[in-house]
Amino acid sequence: MTIVEQITEWVNQPDKAGWWRFTVRKALELGELSQPDYEEIYQIAKMEFGLTAKVHDFDSLVSLVAPAGFGVEEEAYNLTSISQVSHVSSLSSDQRIQFSPTGITVVYGDNGVGKSSYAKILKNACLTRGDAPEVIPNIFTGANGTPSAVIEVESNGTSQLLTWQKGGDNHAPLKSIRVFDSYSSAHYLSKSDSIDYRPAALALLDEVVNAASYISAKCTSDVAGLRQSLVLPQMHSDTAASELATTINSITTIAQVEAHCATDDEAEALPTLQLEHRELTTNTPKVLRQRYQSKRKSLEPFRDFLLELNNRLGDRALKDCEMLYQKSVTTREASNRLGEEAFSRLPIDKIGSHEWQVMWKAVETFVSEANPGKGFPPAEGEICPTCLQTIGEESSARLDSFHQYLKNEIHKEASAANKAFKDALTVINSANTDTQPYIPVLELVGGFNADLREKLGSLISAFIARKDAALGKTPDFSRSSLDLGPLEWLDAQIKSLSEKEAGVKDDEAQAKTIADKLKVIQETEDRLKIREYKQAILDEIEKAKLRDKYSKLSGTTTSSAVTRKNTEISASSSIAQIHDYFIEELRILGFKHYAVEAATRGSRGKQMLSLKLSGNGSKLPDIASEGEQKCISLAGFLAELRVDDRKSAVIFDDPVNSLAQKWRLKFAERISEEAKHRQVIVLTHDLPFLMMLQETAEEINVLALTRNSTTTGLLLDRLPWDSMKTAARINDLKGRLPELRKLFDENEEAFQVQARSTYIDMRKAWERLIEEWLIKGIVERFGRGVKPTNVRYLVDTQESDVATINDAMNKCSRCCHDTASELGATYPDVDELEQDINDFEAYFKELRTRRNARNSS
């Protein structure tokens, strides 16, 4: 598991703050973070702890971190091309920079040709240490637009076209490709008492520590403005309200505060309580008892009067009376329907009426008293007790139907219901509504509470209205609701007076009542203060909650957990490997002017590989040159490549700035070795370094850039002359012949100018042949070393070689210095020039064959 994977797995644990993950994700994306980045992290941390509202994508910002571009490599990616560049400095938009999938691709160009602009695209799109450089449009044309480019990558034979846009989303394949430049070099090194190399991945933990320090300082500053500033008025001791006032904190709820605020009723009652307290303290128990008793007895009759009215005319009483009325109506109607059947088709009206029933009852009573044991009504053949006529069959049947009707239950029920209803009306009618005896009480009440007096009047009027409606010709029991509050108030006053009377039964009772009353007054006064300062108290609670949240946030800024992880990783095998590889890379690069040892050391939560002089107390930064320090950073970068064991492409942007020639050659050799295992891309303006790469690389592809007056990043159709080998130079000379022949036919003077330039380059080509093939690189123009093993190639050098080369270079010198015309000789024509080039090529092929044969032997 790589260091980055260890860190991301650790920061993804549930006990780690979300802002830690945001920090690591941002550091993975940007490398070294700046103050604006730390401020953004602080804002995310405040959201996490409820100090500010969360943005809509907060959850994704603090979600689990993936080691994109840093984890175990599932696929190795090569860079195929860059094209369709838009709004990047003055780069041409129609160029396509094609990279070789294997070996080394060198992008060569002088300053100002666009090489750095392409490098900026790669540093922003791919993975680099330190801050990625700013990419801006062409400032000279004033063009606006978002810088972008299409970058093609390839993996396992599959290509992808990825659109990079400034400020846009990252592409994981591009983040697998790493870039090393001078900024990366500074990022790899920390210069203090010693030169400290930090594995780049551990910088992720550094950024967590840096962000934590920033957040801790900001929390301290912000909390300073949240100090408790609430000052409440003096309160009485031992009241519930005063206890609340002294214990206001973050867990105090709004409900608790509101529960300790005085109500409007309490505020209104306070003057009465204070008056009663003064009354208690300025009178004897006897005087007070008499006073309370007198008030109670004046109120009790009026209370009883209202209670009686409510008993007779209240909702319950009217509802019961209404039910009796309804029953009397329904049973009477049923009885009448039955009577219609019994008394229909009779010659006399009103048979069955109430008056008739009274008469029938009287006759029945007469018969039963005059003739005990004789039945009623008389049967057929008997004498009628009223008309003294014999009862016939028809009369007997009719009398029997009358009797059966009167015996029916519905008739009896109707009679009973009618009676009950009339009795209820009697009760209502007897309700006393005369208020004359109670006018003094009403006036007394109105003297201190006009609203209550009005309500009492309204209640009495409602009772009278109900009585009149119920006793009307057609009883009306519809009723509006009664406000019995005044009656309840009277009852409460009477009970209160009874309690007051009992509370002053003697001196001891009076003292206790005075103390209780004072307690209520003090509690009410303090509750009124809480009510007055309610909003200030609520504000203080919010500040306390904020202080708690800041405290919890500050609790996540301690570096102990980061230090433990740093130590754990530093003790792991990966750090040990980096240590060993690091020392080996220094050796490979030839860093051995003085003995250097590397040791792991801790520094404020960080673990570093500290470089120091072996057995010497001198400080390495005071001794190591800028080039030597650059060499150290290169060694660190290469060591990490070996530990990660990743095969995606690596890009070096001017990697040998500040390096002496000896370092350049070593690094050229090291890059060439690395190119055997992965795609390597080098951007450089250093021609000697380019030629060193050509000498050391097994496979190399060189691209050259140029510019015109307005546009940069233009691809040359050939390499710079100084970077060409012999074969390429001969091909270039041959390529000029068609244009030279055309000039010869059209303008002899113009031909001579171009021919002179061609002979100059031909002389340089012969020089290159001598260096490259005749002496086989025993000594080189850009090399300070000598290759003695190549002396064997000189064995088969012949006199003809010396003569051929000497004659050819003499002729080139004569033609390029224009001595031919001065001596009266004819300047070579185009056919002679072509023959000179062909002779050069023929000799080159013969010499190359001979030298290759010597090499194989």
Image (spheres, rainbow, N blue to C red):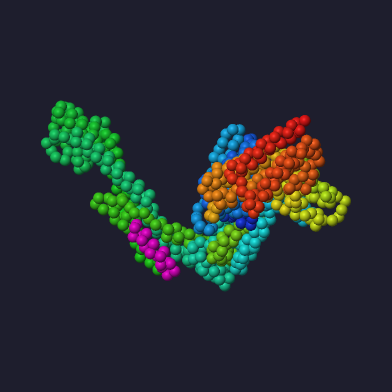
User: Where does the image place residue 783, in percent across and percent down from the top left?
Assistant: 75, 47
446 in the magenta segment: yes
18 to the left or right of 413? right
Q: Quadrant of residue 430?
A: bottom left
Q: Which quadrant of the figure contains the N terminus? A: top right
Q: Residue at x 68, y 52 (%)?
A: 182
Q: Nearer the viewer, residue 733 or 238?
A: 733
Pick whichever, 651 or 68, lies toward us: 651
The question of residue 685 being in magenta is answered with no
Q: x, y percentage for residue 140?
A: 53, 58
The span picked out in magenta is 444-463
Q: Residue furthest front?
A: 824
Residue at 29% x, 44% y is 326
Residue at left 41%, top 57%?
Answer: 484
Quarter residue 99 falls in: top right
Number of on-image labels: 0
Residue 790 in picture, x, y percent from top left: 78, 39
Q: Quadrant of the C terminus?
A: top right
Q: Is residue 402 above or below residue 273?
A: above
Does residue 72 show up?
no
- Image location (x, y in percent) of residue 489: 45, 60
Q: Is residue 693 left or right of residue 193?
A: left
